[in-house]
Image (cartoon, helix red, strand yellow):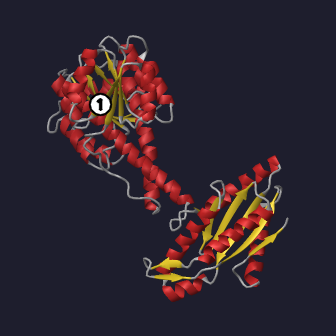
Amino acid sequence: MTARVLVVDDVIPNLKLLEARLTAEYFDVVTATNGYEALKICERGECDIVLLDVMMPGMDGFEVCRRLKNNPATLHLPVVIVTALDETADRVRGLEAGADDFLTKPIDEIALIARVRSLARLKLVTDELRNRAETSASLGVSGAVRHALDDGQGGSVLLVEDRPHSAQRILSALRGRYQVDVETEAHQALFTAAEQDYQLVIVSLGLADFDGLRLCSQLLSLDRTRNTPLLIIVDLEDRQRILRGLDLGVNDYIVRPVDPNEIIARVRTQIRRKRYADALRSNVREAMELAVLDPLTGLNNRRYLETHLGGLLDQAAERGRPVAIMMLDVDHFKRVNDTYGHEAGDEVLKTFADRIRRKVRSADLMCRLGGEEFVVVMPDTRLTTAQCVGERIRAAVAGTPFPVKSGDRAIPITVSIGVADSLGGEPIDALLRRADQALYLSKNAGRNRVTATAA
């Protein structure tokens, strides 16, 4: 997977070395020699990942990282801090500034490429979610896109570790900040992670009776857990397994002995990223729902009907089973709006939809075509049965006046219904037209009645 990588270093030989290594792996490379130039490149959207040297004149890498993560336009950019310093305090400082990882000079080429590829995958997924969410928001079909990372505090963490001393060290570090559950058995951990809503899973690669990477692979393969970030605990000599883990999709790693401040910072970083991604997914999910739902009644809309009715008819034809269509129209609805106002009309439509729901099966497809027109599609239903259901709906509508204005008054409402059925092989338009003709007959005969037309 390729990406545009911004390399920031004021030492030209270092800059050229990293550029050559990344270019050889088919990454596009952009360079900058100071923090101010790097910020401008990032704000213009000219890179996907930032490799940022710490020791630079004017503005050090920590400050550049902090500014990137505080800017809504750049907070989603993965940042890897690169430095000659190898102190835990420096790693923690970088992570607290918002960095996604920390590489120490001299840089291991394999580790560099593995980390960049891992972050490129993360950036690709995040960008796709952001683009979909922002498009939906711009069209007014979902809420505003979240443009900030929270503080990453709170939430639940699953720790998979069978070394008591190591588990206790991590528990002590995270206590008071996160709810941490500990599992010593990998098989049980898989079930626990799938059943609970954890925001991070920490997996030791030193489990006595199970391959920790195998557990990571299983977690990444399950729908329920594939979006849960994974942090692995490794020994320093586990270099090849670290690289393999990153290649599998593990989000981060920490080396034993685990430093309390470093694990706090890494846990916070992963949880912040998960919450941001979850917020984007929520926007996209909301947009998808609104695209096929009528916002007033909560029923499916015309677009959903047109998309799914053909499939239902095809299935019915293959199985030799009937499908019934019911067209419903609220009688004299314009008079309701003119007399009581559009707000009262909206209340009537919502109550009308609720009464339909109570009289049909969960397997039936209910849609609002627009205005006061509705459709119910009933699989495995013959015409006579559909006519009986229509009569129950008609009686439920006419039997009790509709409360409006918070119950201050009630309006008598009736409905005209037309029913048709098909055994498949009939064009969608023809079936809908027959149901609509039956509806017309109900209206023409005085309304508040059900009329059926056979195929």
Query: What is the three-letter code of the residue carrying label 1?
Result: Val
Residue 112 position, x and y percent, is 35, 23
Residue 252 position, x and y percent, is 34, 27
**Residue farthest along the right direction in this orientation:** 455
Residue 340 vertical placement versus 384 (above, below): below
Q: Is residue 46 left or right of residue 33?
A: right
**Residue farthest along the front direction in this orientation:** 399
Residue 125 vertical placement versus 394 (above, below): above
Q: Is residue 52 left or right of residue 144?
A: left
Residue 78 position, x and y percent, is 33, 37
Instruction: Using the rendered image of the protein, determine whether residue 25 is visible from the camera's viewpoint.
Output: no
* Image quadrant containing the C terminus: bottom right
- For label 1, the SS is strand
Instruction: Using the rendered image of the protein, determine whether residue 71 is visible from the camera's viewpoint.
Output: yes
Residue that label 1 marks: 180
Q: Quadrant of residue 9?
A: top left
| Residue at 33 percent of width and 19 percent of height | 161
Residue 152 position, x and y percent, is 27, 40
Residue 226 vertical placement versus 246 (above, below): below
Q: Quadrant of residue 234?
A: top left
| Residue at 32 percent of width and 32 percent of height | 157
Of the pair 130 and 323, the residue shown nearer to us:
323
Crowd rating for badge 1 (residues with CA inside 10 Å; few <14, some 14–19, many 20+): many
Of the pair 407 and 300, the residue shown nearer to us:
407
**Residue farthest along the bottom direction in this orientation:** 339
Q: Is residue 93 left or right of residue 186?
A: left
